[in-house]
Image: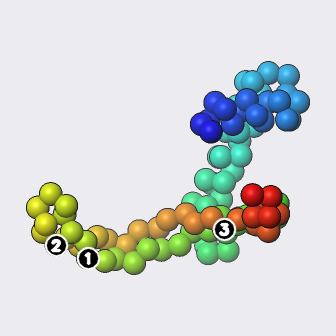
Amino acid sequence: MNKADFISSVWKLGKYDTKTEAAKAYDTVVCALTGRLSKGTAKDRVIRLPELGTFKIKTRKARKGRNPQTGKTISIPSKKVVSFKSGKSLSTSI
């Protein structure tokens, strides 16, 4: 499912008048998730949606890697990544 398919589903299920309104709803949710996860404190970097799951910022440690073209060892710096753990209702519905 791509973004257009998802917006069409939201449009049908949400009973929006137009797909444009459904697209605005999608953009609003994405903006809210992105804004909340990018805030500074650890408490702000966790979003729990009971029916869906939990979005959380984690820090991936620095590590050694290998350049596949040259075989040379490289240093990969640490970085922040978003993790998602599905909620119970989502897991059981699959």
Image quarter for residue 93?
bottom right
Mark 3 or mark 2: whose residue is earlier in sequence: 2
Mark 1 or mark 3: whose residue is earlier in sequence: 1
Label 2 secondary element: strand
Specify whether 5 is left or right of 76.
right
Specify whether 76 is left or right of 16.
left
Specify whether 62 is left or right of 43.
left
Label 1 secondary element: strand
> The N terminus is located in which quarter?
top right
Q: Which residue is mark 2?
A: 73
**Disc 3 packing (10 Å; few <14; some 14–19; many ≥20):** few
Instruction: Tell me the residue at 57%/66% (across/down).
Output: 83
Instruction: Tell me the residue at 85%/22% (across/down).
Output: 17
Q: Which residue is mark 1?
A: 64
Looking at the image, residue 72 lies above or below residue 29: below
Image quarter for residue 85?
bottom right
Q: Which residue is mark 3?
A: 85
Three-letter residue code for mark 3:
Lys
> The C terminus is located in which quarter?
bottom right
Looking at the image, residue 91 lies above or below residue 24: below
Count of all numbered marks drawn on residues in the image: 3
Three-letter residue code for mark 1:
Lys
Mark 1 or mark 2: whose residue is earlier in sequence: 1
Looking at the picture, how far across and down is residue 57, in whole percent? 57, 68
Find the distance from the CA under tag 1 to the CA under tag 2: 7 Å
Three-letter residue code for mark 2:
Thr
Nearest the viewer among 71 and 30 is 71
Label 3 secondary element: strand
Looking at the picture, how far across and down is residue 6, in whole percent? 69, 36
Nearest the viewer among 20 and 87 is 87
- Badges 1 and 2: C-beta atoms under 8 Å apart? yes
